[in-house]
Amino acid sequence: MFENLIRKNVRDMVGSKSGPPVAFLTPKGDRGLLGPESMAWQVHADFISMMIGGISSLALQALHPQALAGVWDHSSFREDLKGRLGRTAFFIAATTYGPTAMAHQVIAKVNAIHEKIQGVDEFGRPYRATDPHLLAWVHLTETLSFLNAYQSHRRPKLSLAQQDQYFREMKVLGEMMGASHLPDTLAGTLAAVKTYLPELHYGERAQSIVQLLDGFPSNLQSKPFVKLITKAGLINLPEWAFSILKKPIPTRWERLAVAACIDLVAIPVREALKDGIAAHSYRRAYG
């Protein structure tokens, strides 16, 4: 009963109405693009840290005017935040855990959508969603946000070698999406992100997105859970981001308090979701 309630709250946050992920059970023996021994399978299996990292990455991506323009002009992000988060969650799940055909299919679908997206940003500068530079920004902010959240909320933490392996694996997916010059280490990723800092801008558009994330829509029942996840997501941002967002850097005590709450909430959530996409995919891969 309690686990069903948790699953309902989780589905509400990502706007999902789907049931058990049976599509990930076949074909038997299919290891997908990365395989069950990958760090990506381990990191992406934790719903709590993935949702926290997802909030962080959306906030960071909003800081790049051209990356934001594509979403601003060509998606229902502002009207359907849950739907956007749900579609992103499915894309990550399909490319990480899906059988090979599923992964290639969703990548081809997104790439085809990107081909049609172009325009001008808030400064009148042209952009294309297929621009490898913009795609790299999206990739870098997602992977770094996911890993930072995992390192903050899962134990034991990954070693430096395991973190480098994660970025090496994710580079494969990023390049399939059209990104270029992607690093394959943690140090390289941190350095690459910093090269984008002069391009970032916290204008009215970005402010509206961050405010939307901060007030993530939810029903009364799931509101405390959603507020905690979004709070943790904003705390998960890199320190340089807070000056751009004109927000104070979270104190050590604030970080500890949120982390303690996440630890408590994570226990029943992880138990309720233990037979999710990752578990189904392991059964398929070792079938």
Image (tube, rainbow, N blue to C red):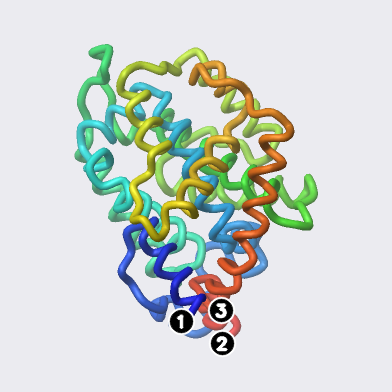
Q: Earlier in the sequence, mark 3 or mark 1?
A: 1
Which residue, given by chain and number where applicable, does mark 2 sit on?
Answer: 287
Residue at the (38%, 52%) spot, across then down? 88
How far from the left and from the top, in percent, is residue 219? Answer: 34, 56
Q: Quadrant of the C terminus?
A: bottom right
Marks 3 and 1 sit apart, C-alpha to C-alpha, by 8 Å
Q: Residues within 10 Å of mark 1 (few under 14, many from 20)?
A: many
Between circles 3 and 1, the one closer to the viewer is 1
Please say if 265 is above or below 211. below
Please say if 170 is above or below 251. below
Badge 2 amino acid: Gly
Which residue, given by chain and number where applicable, does mark 1 sit on?
Answer: 25
Q: On the image, which quarter does residue 265 sit in? A: bottom right
Marks 1 and 2 sit apart, C-alpha to C-alpha, by 9 Å
Q: Which mark is residue 232?
A: none
The reply to whether dot 2 and dot 3 touch (C-beta < 8 Å) is yes
Q: On the image, which quarter does residue 9 sit in? A: bottom left
Residue at the (36%, 56%) spot, across then down? 220
Marks 2 and 3 sit apart, C-alpha to C-alpha, by 6 Å
The reply to whether dot 1 and dot 2 touch (C-beta < 8 Å) is yes
Q: Earlier in the sequence, mark 1 or mark 2?
A: 1
How far from the left and from the top, in percent, is residue 268? Answer: 59, 69
Q: Which mark is residue 285?
A: 3
How far from the left and from the top, in percent, is residue 210? Answer: 40, 31
